[in-house]
Amino acid sequence: MCGIIGCVGRGDETLDTLVHGLSKLEYRGYDSAGVAMASGGVDLCKTAGKIEDLRDALSSVSLSGSVGIGHTRWSTHGPPTNANAHPHQDCTGDVAVVHNGIIENYQSLRDELVSAGHTFTSDTDTEVVPHLIEDELADGAAPEAAVRSAISRLEGSYAIATVIAGTEAVFAARHDSPLVLGLTEGATFLASDVPAFRDFTDQVIYLDDGEFARLDADGWAVSTLDGSPVEKEVNVVEWDPEETGKSGYDHYMLKEIHEQPRALRQCLRGRVDEMAGTVDIEDLGDLSPTGVQFVACGTSYHAALYGAQLFREAGIPAQAFLASEYATAVPPIGDALVVGVTQSGETADTLSALREARKRGARTMAVTNVVGSTAARECDHAFYIRAGPEIGVAASKTFSTQLAALNLLMLGMTNEEGAREVIAALRELPGNVQRILDESNAEAVAETYRDADSYFFIGRGYQFPVALEGALKMKEITYKHAEGFASGELKHGPLALVTENTPVFAVVTGDGEQARKTVGNVKEVEARDAPVVAITDGQSDVGRYADHVLELPETHPRAAAVLANTHLQLLSYHTAALLGRNIDKPRNLAKSVTVE
Ligand code: F6R
């Protein structure tokens, strides 16, 4: 949800550093982009479109300065036009500001500033900030004080960075939107996320809400917004910058789908003892909750549905809630644990649900991929899925590792009978995913159904969240209509939509009662001429009713969910590729949704 960057100390490389950083942040938004650099004055270039369009625009202007800021936007206020692109300036052109978040009181601030004679050139909420700074400077405030005072008037969420003519510094502040500093000898960076400067350093400082940073030739200083110095811990980022490249794949998403075996191994490493049949998550302390509530959005919500089922099977009451609906949910009972499943750790809906849970007296946990993310820092516990950086906007390897991590969490917190069997299946999972990546015929199936009107996905039990996820992935990256259903629900309405042009993808594993019932549902759609694709381990007779089969090895149903999902990821990916879609940056979406 918008990416911001700033840097000081890169000399002649400043502009290239900013643009390079923006290209690494483009997954956060790609409606428009811009940069501003300051020395005696402020030079600025911005445009609607992607970073490539910004590069084109920069080829015909000359920007100078040794400190700079940049922005890549996902629109919230105003359409993605040149005028609405960041950075935004004041009336004099001496102040430039980039912002990620939403300023909730912008309308009253804007009215006040317009009455005082300021001229606005955009529809954005952000533009109030440079005008507020302008007023403070006009009243005689020093640049840093002017920025602090202006920011103290804002309500809502923000990560803000600003440069001011004549000041060789970048000032920044955060409230409810991420901001991280990168440190090297001689140069300092700030950004919404580490990949923006990971090529230069692995030393980072995560800013907390209410903190203010000054970056200048002397280095960096962090304080509260009203000026009290804050001691910050320097963290070392463990992943390699190479991990954020495409490594020869056409798309990040395809690379990340193929990285799943490695990601799963990383997730399991050091946490399972196959001989003893135990899982070690001792670093989380003694959890033993009386119940678990999951809160999450989108793909992570599908993982949460799966997680809730795991805990219920182990005898612990558990429910999954859409984070944005959590405020109306029943309060956690007794010594409950509220678990936010969030890849980024920055999703506003999920953070807000976790804060609500704390208010209600619950202990909270983040199941997340991002060390130092807001969820990880705000929750009582953080459990890392260790998927490595995911750049493609559509989640892939983070979903698989969320499922694996939730198994570990459940096994580490309970004495579930049958743990040994699950652990063995988890151990085999990376190899089995690799087999599917090597052998899946999902591309041929995608070719067969590329012109379908609509795609339906069905499954029961652990395969129900997989059906939901299969449909979400299909919608996101192909822009085609797709729906996921609990198999039993089809006959309660959606069956009316089934025709010979609506392929139904049925995930059927094992030969138990759930499989038998889903096979019955498959017969219902087959009788109405719908093409059927079975994703199955062949234990049931679903193959008899299917036009195509995507094969799974026999394994535990919990592990089968990850394997079935791998086929469905490939199906969506290849359908989108055949349709020529922008797979890594689907329209209207962003990787990290930091607004509610
Ligand atoms: C879909 C997708 C989104 C995210 C959702 C939550 O491919 O990526 O649905 O799952 O926005 O994001 P996180 O997990 O970062 O909280």
Image (cartoon, rainbow, N blue to C red):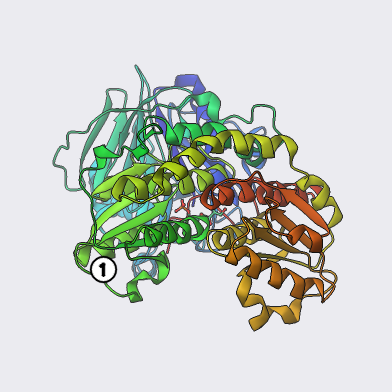
Q: In which quarter of the image is residue 458?
A: bottom right
Q: Where is residue 247 in the image (x, y as percent from the top left)?
A: 64, 27
Is 441 in front, or is 143? 441
Q: Tell me residue 85's x, y (percent).
A: 55, 51
- Tell me the element at label 1: loop
Instruction: Tell me the kind of residue under disc 1.
Output: Pro
Outermost left residue? 228
Above or below 515: residue 385: above
Using the rendered image of the protein, determine whether residue 219 is visible from the camera's viewpoint: yes
Q: Can residue 147 be seen in this view?
A: no
Where does the image place residue 11, in percent across and percent down from the top left?
Answer: 45, 20
Answer left or right for 476 relative to 304.
right
Please state the total of marks drawn on the protein image.
1
Q: Does the residue labelled 1 lie within 8 Å of ligand 1?
A: no
Residue at figure coordinates x 24%, y 62% from the top left: 290
Q: Nearer the viewer, residue 322 or 191?
A: 322
Comparing 113 with 274, the one in front is 274
Which quadrant would residue 491 be assigned to in this image? bottom right
Quarter occupied by the C terminus? bottom left
- Which residue is identified by label 1? 332
Residue 333 in percent (x, y) is at 23, 69
Say if 511 sits above or below 406 in the image. Answer: below
